[in-house]
Amino acid sequence: MNSKLTYHKTTLANGVRVITVPMKNTSAVTSIVFVKTGSRHEYRKENGISHVLEHMLFQGTKKRPDKITLKRELDRIGAQSNAYTSQDHTAYYVKADAKHLDLSLDILSDMYLHPLFKKEALEKERRVVAEEIHMVKDTPQRQVWDNFYQLLYPDNSLGWSIAGPAKTVLSLTNKDLFSYLARGYVAKNTVIVVAGNTNERQVITKVKKYFRGMQKGRLSAYAPVSDKQKEARVHSEYKKIGQAHLVVGVPGYSALDKRRYALDVLSAILGGYSSSRLVVSVRDDLGLAYYVGADVNYHEDTGSFSAYAGINLRNIDLGITAIMKEFQKAATRPITKKEIDDAKSHIEGAFSLRLEASDSVAVGAGWSELMTGRIETPDEYVKNIKKVSAEDLQAVAKDIFKTEKLNFAIIGPFQKKDAKRFQSLLHI
């Protein structure tokens, strides 16, 4: 693979890292501000504040006193703008025509450095976020993931909901937001990525102009995960619905672990595309699910592998057993060369498509810098994927697929007694 992309990284005097990725074959530029603070950096009493803060940065600044003013500026240039909060970080982006790079950076820096946090705006937005929390709880396909992470990390902030409890969110004050902003939104925690029709010199000059005055601060701290699990764990939530939604997974590897490339390939083989093992066995052969797949997640100190599905209520046991069989097969039988080659080809092809868009390029570069402290280029990533052998895959499968490391979350019309039955089916 030859992505023909060049990545430039500059660390400013105050500690802000600036990554520039020039892209000639586009008229757009995506500017993203990554802040290395998310739900795992919160205190229990403020759980959800990272997400509320993300919302509030769009509610007005000293220069743009309300969200309508801010929205109109973005709408006038046809820009795409949004933000997201994760366990590890928060990100804000503007994607616009390259001629509007100044305005993009001006708006992002204004939001970052000069938010107002008006009390009346916070009161409204807290209610909006609370409704978002209620919506997730009413959407089992999403809520089951919160339940899974709570199960996987029971004694760590990594297992907390990113959105937080509605009660906590509704109690947050503008004083809480300013305090959290001062703690986490600092230069050392900040990575600014600009990808698209621009150049390094232009970007550095503009970032220095718009983001001047940032406090150096300290890197956000978090409690590292300590894996003490000795038996399979089950979380069953009762909900009167017509389909069961489940996630079953195990601890995996950190973003710094070289075995993650083998895990990426294994995840693709098991549930990464429509001809993967889980899709064929659970959906095509048994007809138990409309959606089924596999997922990997990486953090600085840990990670996870999981399978997920929406299963016909009458065949839950059969569905769980089918997933366990695929885990066991991966750990005990060598994977064929054809399957491995197909998975690698799929990963490379899908990765190549993402490189056509400046926003995907910017997100990839920013995540890599935040999680590993360096930029892993697309060519480097694909090169590492191509190195994965059948022996690597089986070694990883044997290492992670252990009965005592299983975590199983399910939502459906089940009674407490059903949890014991589910537990009995969790065998690899």
Image (tube, grey):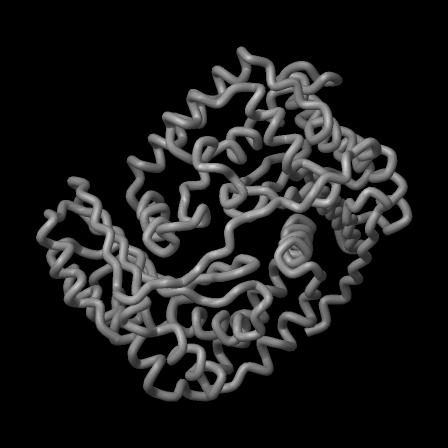
> Where is 47 relative to 282, above or below?
above
Q: Nearer the viewer, residue 28 or 83?
A: 83
The residue that appears at 44% across and 21% down in the rendered structure is 171
> Is residue 273 visible from the viewing direction of this image?
no
Q: Nearer the viewer, residue 22 or 189?
A: 189
* Left or right for 279, reference 42: left
The residue that appears at 19% across and 47% down in the rendered structure is 412
How many marks can you see? 0
> Where is 210 relative to 262, above or below?
above
* Left or right for 110, reference 209: left
Quarter where residue 109 is shown? top right
> Where is 385 relative to 135, above or below?
below
The residue that appears at 15% across and 63% down in the rendered structure is 317
* Left or right for 257, reference 238: right
Quadrant, the N terminus: bottom right
The residue that appears at 53% across and 76% down in the rendered structure is 344
Residue 385 in the image: state x and y as whole percent. 58, 76
* Left or right for 234, reference 105: left
Residue 4 in the image: state x and y as whole percent. 77, 66
Residue 108 in the image: state x and y as whole percent. 71, 32
Residue 60 in the image: state x and y as whole percent. 65, 19
> Is residue 401 visible from the viewing direction of this image?
yes
Q: Nearer the viewer, residue 397 or 15?
A: 15
Residue farthest toward the top in the current orientation of the protein: 120
